[in-house]
Amino acid sequence: MPELPEVESTVRYLQEKIVGSIIRDVQVLWHRTVATHSPAAFTTALVGRKFRSVSRRGKYIICELEGGTQKLNYLLMHLRMTGSIDVISGREPIDKHDRVIFFFKDGGELHYHDPRKFGKMYLVSELAFLETKLGPEPLDPLLNTEKFHALLKKRDTTLKTFLLDQSNIAGIGNIYADEALWFAGLHPRARTKKVTLLKAERLLTSIRKVLSEAIEKFGTDFGDGVVEMGGYAPSIYGRAGEGCLRCQGVIRRIVVQQRSTHLCVACQPLRRSGSCTGT
DNA sequence: CAAACTCCCTGTTAGC
DNA sequence: TGCTAACAGGGAGTTT
């Protein structure tokens, strides 16, 4: 499932592949993928326009457009669970799971692929709403321990729930939430209100560690065809029943917030801080 | 405000 | 072997 590292990898790929490309035609194969427009209106608004830049905010891919008469200058793409993007230089047959295809003037094509159809595209004129709905970027150096601690204190919930809520902090999903909590030696069900400044620092450091390492490896590959890219090997996520890499204890799977959650009860005690400190 | 639930979807897997 | 039902999950929305 694409989270911040997978989205960041996709953004870097698109920067290389589509900046400067001009849209010749658009084919919407699943109308609900386009959240803001009808397929016809979407196509009309996009034909003739050029991709000026590609960036990211949380798990949203932001394509800045130029040209055209409308004010709709941003094409946002969210991959949700199973979305992925392929840019190819020539014509390619339509895949069973392709939902939207952009045809470029130079003959290239962008295939938006999404088996489960949860992904969305938005064509909008401003980005302010993203700042309203999303918390800070975890890798933003302006986010320091004190600010992160204050964010935690503002909420009364579990750490896992806190990390998954994009309005608290942007870009973390189920995999990297579990990874970060394990590295920090914190229990997913620990309460946000009880986190000390020291533990907040440990958690923020762990979040940055797992996200940075995953970006370097182009994300996580589950071998199930859902996310195709990366070489990041989770330390705890998806390893229920296997041994903890730090203490050899057995990794448990519990459910928090209707999400499967992986932890080592020895390294991530609920009450006192354990013998295993994060890295 | 938080928690719990529903919805959107389909590929995979467990169970019969 | 072939079927069905359960399950996974991000995020928006609704209800408790």
Image (tube, coloured by chain):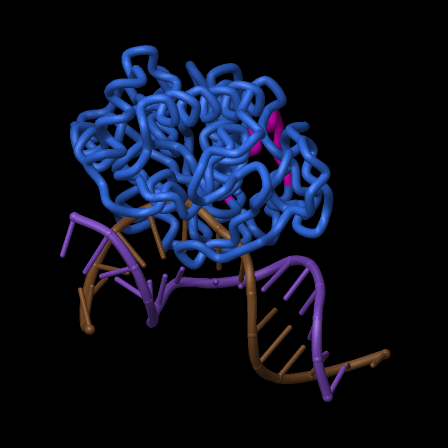
Chain colours: A blue, B purple, C brown
User: Residue C7, position in %: x, y?
Assistant: 56, 65
User: Residue A18, position in %: x, y?
Assistant: 47, 20
> What residue sits 57% from the left and 30% below the top?
A275
> What residue sits 26% from the left and 37% below the top?
A167
User: Residue A182, position in %: x, y?
Assistant: 54, 35
In this orientation, which residue lies closer to the viewer: A46 or A214? Answer: A214
Q: Is residue A260 visible?
A: yes
> What residue sits 61% from the left and 33% below the top?
A220
Residue B16 lies left or right of residue A38; in this view the side is right
Residue A273 lies left or right of residue A58; in this view the side is right
* Quarter of the rendering containing residue A47: top left
User: Residue A223, position in %: x, y?
Assistant: 70, 43
In this orientation, which residue lies closer to the viewer: A168 or A228? Answer: A168
Image quadrant where one finds the C terminus of chain A: top right
Image: magenta residue range = A83-92
Q: Is residue C7 above or below residue A234?
A: below
